[in-house]
Image (cartoon, coloured by chain):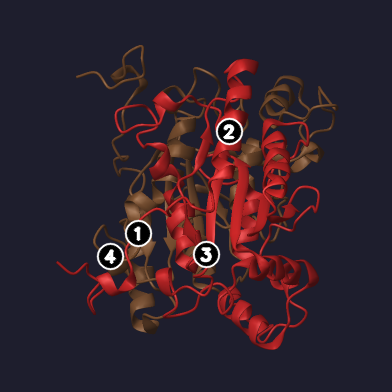
Chain colours: A red, B brown
Amino acid sequence: MKVLIVYAHHEPKSFNGAMKDLAVSTLKEQKHEVKVSDLYAMKFKALADKDDFVKISNPDYLQYVLELKNAVDHDLFIEDTKQEQEKLRWADFIIFQYPLWWFSVPAVLKGWFDRVLATGFAWDFGNMYDKGLLASKKSMLSVTTGGPENIYSLNAPHGWDINQVLYPVNHGVLFFCGIQPIPPFVAFAVFQVGDEKRKQYLEEYKQRLLTIETTKPIKYHSLSDFDENMHLKT
Amino acid sequence: MKVLIVYAHHEPKSFNGAMKDLAVSTLKEQKHEVKVSDLYAMKFKALADKDDFVKISNPDYLQYVLELKNAVDHDLFIEDTKQEQEKLRWADFIIFQYPLWWFSVPAVLKGWFDRVLATGFAWDFGNMYDKGLLASKKSMLSVTTGGPENIYSLNAPHGWDINQVLYPVNHGVLFFCGIQPIPPFVAFAVFQVGDEKRKQYLEEYKQRLLTIETTKPIKYHSLSDFDENMHLKT
């Protein structure tokens, strides 16, 4: 497979960095092709604004979503957006490696979603979910948390389990574009667990990486499961 | 009250801009004091990294969360962080005005969460949720969406209702710091609904603004509702 790793951590020596390095070496050993988008090293521009375009269609009234589509249609993206979209086109499988911050992705990765997953490139009106424009691809979230697993539950302080916490990205971002996420790999409480457990996480992650090609995606609904009022057919 | 409006939209003439302006004028008429953090106008730095600190405690291994706490303890934040924290200290009530992008906040607002809500300032180990360090304050999300209300439901394509979509911010970010959110104001499908409906949204929003001081916060659990294993007491 062709695998793109989108990596969002500020410290190369971090556990996130170790997971990214492990993914690169393990996947290459398996004869996959690998590319990495190291968003911090790239100082990837997070703010979505008019400077993302060589030219905009309506300078007097910036509608970002419409300008994204216009830029797709007329090749008006700045260079970094183009390169990220080119990598996405190339990839069969995308791994997102990041620390869970505020129940979401770090801002730089949110900026990557906002800027790169353009209308007309990743999705379009009528081309969402299983009809999304990146529908042949798969993905996996590889995430670290500060908190331990037991506080991620309906009956614990966070109130949600980790799959609910990751649903906005897995379903709302990736599957919205047609990309099919396989179950995430989560290393909980990486600060607190100690070296032994961290080594075990890396072992487990390596095993997971060996099977990503054959792991079944999370089951989500197809648009054809809904009637014309967008209500689930019974 | 002292009200801070944190506003994240790239186009001053947008509906988000109109909602922000309406909030400023309505709240001032009500004799509230109002400050606005216009994150796009400020070109607020979204990327959380070492440049957020005048000096860091460990240049060889950047642990962002620990540096946040160190910066609180030793007054080491750069100027924009300090100003935002000062506004938060000042405010009794915070309104977040933004368009829902990818089931979350625009990257620039995520960066504001990542950088401003520092350990030791907004929360701390043992000081989370109702024990959060900003526990005397209230908030409201004021959000626009692209999609219509009917696709935000368990049995519709998005799979979640709007309160679930906003839970990671309301509960995971704001209430985590002790801030008590009141129910959000949501203007659905602002592109599609036409001028009449948009005027109606503004009317409804104005009425909402007149009552924010007396509106009861969303009911969430206190930490005292959980036992020593962080499990909900029965």
Indicate whether A164 appears above or below A134: above
Eye-nearest disc, 2 or 4: 4
Q: Secondary structure under badge 3?
A: helix
Q: Which mark is residue B21?
A: 3
Q: Are marks 1 and 3 on the same chain?
A: no
Residue A100 shows in the view: no
Kind of residue sitting beneath label 4: Ala
Kind of residue sitting beneath label 3: Asp
Q: Are marks 4 and 1 on the same chain?
A: no
Residue ID at (78%, 79%)? A54
Point out residue B182 in the picture as x, y percentages from the top left corner: 35, 44
Return the residue at label 1.
A220
Indicate whether A230 appears above or below B64: below
Q: Are marks 1 and 2 on the same chain?
A: no
Residue A91 shows in the view: yes
Return the residue at label 2.
B89
Return the residue at label 4.
B156
